[in-house]
Image: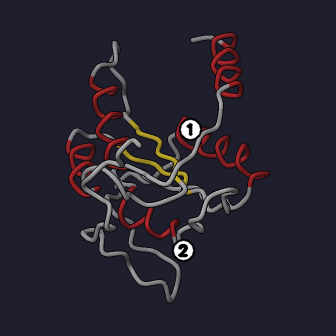
Amino acid sequence: DSAESARAAGAALKAAPVSGGYWTSISGALDRAVKLVAAAPFEATRRVIDLSSDGRNNAGAPLAGARQRALGKGITINGLPVLIMRRNFSFPPMPNLDRYFSDCVIGGPGAFSIVVENYKDLAVSVRRKMIREIAGTFSAEGRVRPVAGKPGVPKFDCREEPPHAGRLPQAG
């Protein structure tokens, strides 16, 4: 609600440790975000979930149901697919993660993704995404699933789930 609180939030984010792992539950993140939006102590004119990931949904519930629950509540899902090769991880970046986000993750009025291709562009990409969301620069008709994609890149079958989807990793 003020410049000072925005600076404090930014400082807290900057100080937070960066963690990573092999498992990504985009469905879990969406379901949790829907609950947080519902519990907000104010009424918003637009409701948007910002989702960032360096991989596809490979743990937890299938993505399609969580996505549909969010869209069914009038919530727009925007994306920040991160195409950066991770250090100290055995999995390479997912090919066409940007297309996966466009076809299977984002949705709702004015939904969009901004791709991050290297670490130096991360802050700029996040800033561009926030400005676009705050400015509300989107078409009146919106979109649930974009149709434009990269030429020659097949459309993802969003019903397909990777082998670990539907279960969470076991501690151990």
What x and y, as percent, mark residue 57?
A: 38, 57
- Seen at 58% across and 55% down, the residue is 114
Residue 57 to residue 6: above or below: below
Q: Secondary structure at mark 2?
A: loop
Q: Residue at x 79, y 51 (%)?
A: 120
The residue lying furthest to the bottom in this view is: 152
Q: Position of residue 73 (x, y in %)?
A: 22, 38
Q: Position of residue 61 (x, y in %)?
A: 25, 51
Q: Label 2 sits on what residue type? A: Pro
Q: Which mark is residue 95?
A: 2
Quadrant placement of the N terminus:
top right
- The residue carrying pointer 1 sits among few (fewer than 14), some (14 to 19) or many (20 or more) residues within 10 Å by Cα, namely few
Task: Work out how far the residue at label 1 is from the one at label 2, CA to CA, in angstroms.
Answer: 31 Å
Q: Residue at x 65, y 18 (%)?
A: 6
Left or right: 120, with 139 as reference point = right
- Label 1 SS: helix
Image x and y of residue 152, in percent:
50, 89
- Between circles 1 and 2, the one closer to the viewer is 2
Residue at label 1? 135
Q: Nearer the viewer, residue 113 or 22?
A: 22
Q: Nearer the viewer, residue 89 or 151?
A: 89
